[in-house]
Structure formats: C-alpha cells, structure tokens
Image: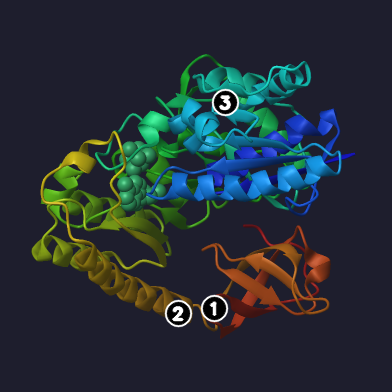
C-alpha cells in the first residue's frame, strides 16, 4: 500500500472534499497515513477565504519540497498536490513558484485525480486542472467511500451567486450548483447503511439549494430534508451554511415540524449596521435578520444560533460597530465566528476607500469576541441540569467514556458511554466545562430515544 496524507484547511466542504479525494485514490493503492514524512503522496486541500492563506500554502510547500528531496535521496518518490480554493485562484502561479508541486487541482475538478496521476506516471511532468462546473464532479465520485463515524457531511450544493463584496467564494467555487436530489438520497442511504445517524448537508449557500427532484420538479432544501428524514437510521439532520435571504418559509416551518432537524442554525449576519450590510451587498438589513430569527424561534423556541461576523469592513465607523454589538445582544448567540476584514484580491471591497486601520480592527475584534464568549458561556451554563438527546460519536479520553454531541453541537462526555457509540441517548448535563459538557445517562437501561 502507498501512503496518502491530506492536510485540510478551511471549511467543512473541504473536509468533505478531502474524504472524497481519499476515496478516489484508494483503488490506486493509497491508504491514509498519519503525516507527510513517510507519505507517497501529499495533498494540501487549501482555503482562500482570508489573507495569508496562499502564503501559508507556499511556506508549507517549501517544507514539503525538503521532504520530497530527502525521500528522493532514498530512491522513494513523493507526489505533491495542491487542491482547493488556492489551487483554483492561483493556478499556474503555484507551479511557477514551487516546481516541486506535481498536481494543481481545483475544487470542481478533483474527480479527475486518477487520470492526472496516470498522466504523471506517463511522464507528463506537472498537471493542472481547474475547470468548472461541479456537475461533472459529482457524477464521477465513487459511490463506496469510507465512513468514519456516526456523523457525516454530505455536500448538496456548491458555489455562490450572492457576490458579497468581501468574498472570494463566487470566484473560486463558481456559480451555484445543486446536486440532483436522487443522487443525494442515494448517498445518504449508503451512509445510513454504513452506520451514519446524523447528516450535515453542506453548501456554500446551502439553503439556496434548488435541485432536480426524482419527479423532475425543482426541490427546495426543505423538501430534500423531509425526504432524507425518512431514511431508516437517519436520526438527525443539520445544514450549513445558510444565507438569511434564502431562508424560505418551508425551511422555517421544518424547524417546528421535523424532530430530526436539529434546533441549531448557523446563519451568518456579518454586521449589524445597515450601511455596512449595504456596502457588503448582503441584500438584507439588520432588522430583516432580527425578524427572521424571531420567525424561526416562533417555530422552535429552543433554537440556538451561530453566526459569522466581519469587523473593520471598509468604511465601518464606531457607530456601525456599535450596531453590530447591539444586534449580537438582541439575538443572543450560542456560538459564533468573527474575523477582521481581510482584503481579497479581485473582490470589490479590497479596492474600496476608507480601509480600517489594523489596530482599530484588532480592538473591535477583541471587543466583539468578548461579548460573543460571554454569550457562549451563558448558553452553556443554561444547559446545566437539563436533559437532551446526545448522539455518541467516539470514545472519550478516559476508559469507557463516550463523547457525543448535543442538539446544539456541544461536545458532551459521559462516563460509561463508550458502548453507546452510534446511539442517541437522553443525557442530563451535570457539569459545564470550558469547551464541553459532562453528563449522565438519564436512564441507562432504556433503548434509544427519538431525536
Ligand atoms: N475577510 C474577513 N472575513 C471573511 N469572510 C469571508 N471573506 C472574508 C474576508 N475577505 C468570513 C465571512 C464568511 C466566513 C466563512 O468567512 O464571515 O461568512
Ligand atoms: Fe461569500 Fe457572501 Fe456567497 Fe457567503 S453568501 S459565500 S459570504 S459571497
């Protein structure tokens, strides 16, 4: 067997893609290894969303070049591939800057990896593939991929047509594309047969999903979710990432109607200032977002929210930043990601006037993160003494301990639960730790609870 090492940067869609690349290479004799040192092939699956991502990739490639030379001295080859969004954005530039790279492959073209490796073995030197669209990719992925636990990702949609002025995604991942529902259902059935109990449906703009249904009509994300919930063994469903503008009524209703749909939603708002939201081309106001959250909560009172925020977007002044803090206070988040604005080449905001100085960005980020951590701690503290269903995913650090996830994605440790991996059990939370919860089985003798 040859050893394959994939290093994944960025979002969950890259995690899914890395797993599919491993599936594609398995029939060629590549098995996952633990690190780059003894790897016959290394893939960097890259992210381009924020600054310095490309630079990080180049310095990692410099280190890999040394390893490749050391292996060559022992007569052993090492193939180096750059995949993902940096590959898409930089293309030829990567081969020019780091000749040790053998393969450059974009996120829509990695299904061609086996052919690309064949070309190399025929003496092609370097190969580069950064074609669109995603359609062909999904038709060509193997249908028998490895399953690594009871919770799995499933990409249902790719690309983005929103063109937020700060974001590279519409350029690196291309236009929105939704996989046909039948293909997704088949993949979900296969995962369920292999023991998967929870599916997280992925897409850059997942709630804009509009795929061809088995009946020929267009299916919305809600329709797809109701269908997936019927699959035997699928106890829980989640989806990410959603755009506020695409939160349709049928999807909102699903939170109230479908017990398999977990009461947790990642709904990025980016800013609480209407002026900034307008300049970001977000297509919604801060109050639109507040009202949307209220509507979803009216269907599912225990809904927990997560978001992404950008501070220091060009032109953001103190009042704009205050408006973001006010929105955070109004909504109340269980968890959130926040970033300093980072100018991305080719995006409209990168050439906007009134870029915010670095020290101001830094101070605002710290302020916002303090508020968000306080909210996260309060949310976790509110779980103390409550009982909820936990899907056990893996053994814990202590003997016999099992670790699972709450409906709100918090890790939950339970002593004696290692035997329950793959099951959903009711757990009472007895301790709130900094990054996780500790719980006890409500009734160790009962069988599975419904979601
Ligand atoms: N600068 C900072 N953050 C960004 N994001 C996307 N582009 C940028 C950028 N240029 C953040 C957004 C998005 C998340 C995935 O990354 O908050 O929702
Ligand atoms: Fe980027 Fe905006 Fe599309 Fe999200 S919705 S991927 S932030 S352009």
Q: Nearer the viewer, residue 276 or 376?
A: 276
Q: Which residue is mark 1?
A: 386
Q: Quadrant of residue 398?
A: bottom right
Residue 384: where, in percent of width, then height? 52, 82
Which residue in the rendered view is the most extreme toward the front?
73
Q: CA distance from mark 2 to mark 1?
A: 8 Å
Q: Which residue is mark 2?
A: 382
Which residue in the rendered view is the most extreme toward the right?
1
Element at badge 1?
loop
Task: Residue at 37%, 49% (x, y): give it.
Answer: 51
Q: Is residue 11 visible?
A: no
For the C terminus, the image quarter is bottom right
Q: Quadrant of residue 412?
A: bottom right
For the N terminus, the image quarter is top right
Nearest to viewer (mark 3 / mark 1): 3
Residue 414: where, in percent of width, then height? 71, 77
Q: Does 353 sit left or right of 364 as displayed?
A: left
Sequence-wise first label, 3 or 1: 3
* Disc assigned to residue 181: 3
Q: Nearer the viewer, residue 273 or 22?
A: 22
Report the number of numbered marks. Answer: 3
Element at badge 3?
helix
């Amino acid at each position: 067997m040859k050893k394959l090492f994939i290093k994944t940067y960025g979002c969950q869609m890259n995690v899914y893609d890395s797993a599919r690349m491993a599936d594609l290479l398995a029939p060629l004799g590549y098995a996952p290894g633990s690190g780059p040192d003894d790897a016959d092939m290394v893939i960097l699956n890259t992210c381009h969303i924020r600054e310095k991502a490309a630079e990080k990739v180049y310095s990692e490639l410099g280190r890999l070049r040394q390893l490749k030379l050391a292996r060559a001295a022992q007569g052993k080859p090492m193939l180096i591939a750059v995949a993902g969004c940096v590959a898409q954005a930089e293309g030829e530039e990567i081969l020019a800057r780091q000749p040790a790279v053998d393969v450059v492959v974009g996120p829509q073209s990695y299904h061609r990896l086996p052919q690309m490796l064949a070309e190399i073995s025929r003496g092609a030197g370097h190969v580069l593939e950064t074609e669109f669209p995603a359609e062909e990719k999904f038709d060509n992925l193997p249908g028998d991929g490895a399953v690594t636990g009871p919770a799995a990702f499933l990409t249902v949609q790719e690309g983005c047509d929103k063109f937020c002025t700060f974001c590279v995604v519409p350029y690196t991942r291309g236009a929105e594309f939704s996989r046909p529902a039948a293909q997704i259902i088949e993949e979900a059935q296969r995962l369920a047969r292999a023991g998967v109990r929870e599916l997280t449906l992925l897409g850059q703009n997942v709630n804009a999903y509009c795929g061809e249904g088995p009946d020929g009509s267009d299916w919305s994300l809600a329709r797809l979710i109701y269908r997936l919930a019927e699959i035997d063994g699928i106890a829980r469903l989640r989806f990410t990432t959603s755009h506020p503008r695409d939160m349709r009524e049928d999807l909102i209703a699903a939170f109230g109607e479908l017990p398999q749909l977990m009461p947790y939603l990642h709904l990025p708002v980016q800013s609480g200032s209407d002026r900034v939201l307008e300049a970001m081309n977000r297509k919604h106001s801060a109050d639109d977002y507040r009202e949307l959250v209220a509507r979803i909560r009216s269907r599912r009172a225990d809904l927990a929210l997560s978001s992404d925020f950008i501070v220091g977007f060009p032109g953001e002044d103190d009042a704009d930043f205050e408006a973001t803090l006010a929105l955070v206070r109004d909504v109340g988040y269980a968890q959130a990601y926040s970033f300093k604005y980072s100018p991305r080449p080719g995006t409209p905001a990168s050439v906007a006037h009134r870029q915010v100085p670095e020290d101001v960005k830094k101070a605002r980020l710290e302020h916002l993160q303090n508020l968000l951590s306080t909210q996260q701690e309060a949310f976790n503290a509110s779980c103390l003494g409550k009982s909820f269903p936990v899907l056990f995913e893996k053994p814990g650090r202590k003997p016999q301990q099992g670790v699972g996830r709450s409906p709100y994605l918090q890790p939950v440790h339970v002593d004696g639960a290692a035997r329950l991996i793959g099951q959903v059990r009711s757990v009472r939370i007895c301790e709130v730790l900094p990054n996780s919860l500790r719980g006890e089985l409500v009734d160790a003798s009962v069988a599975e609870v419904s979601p």
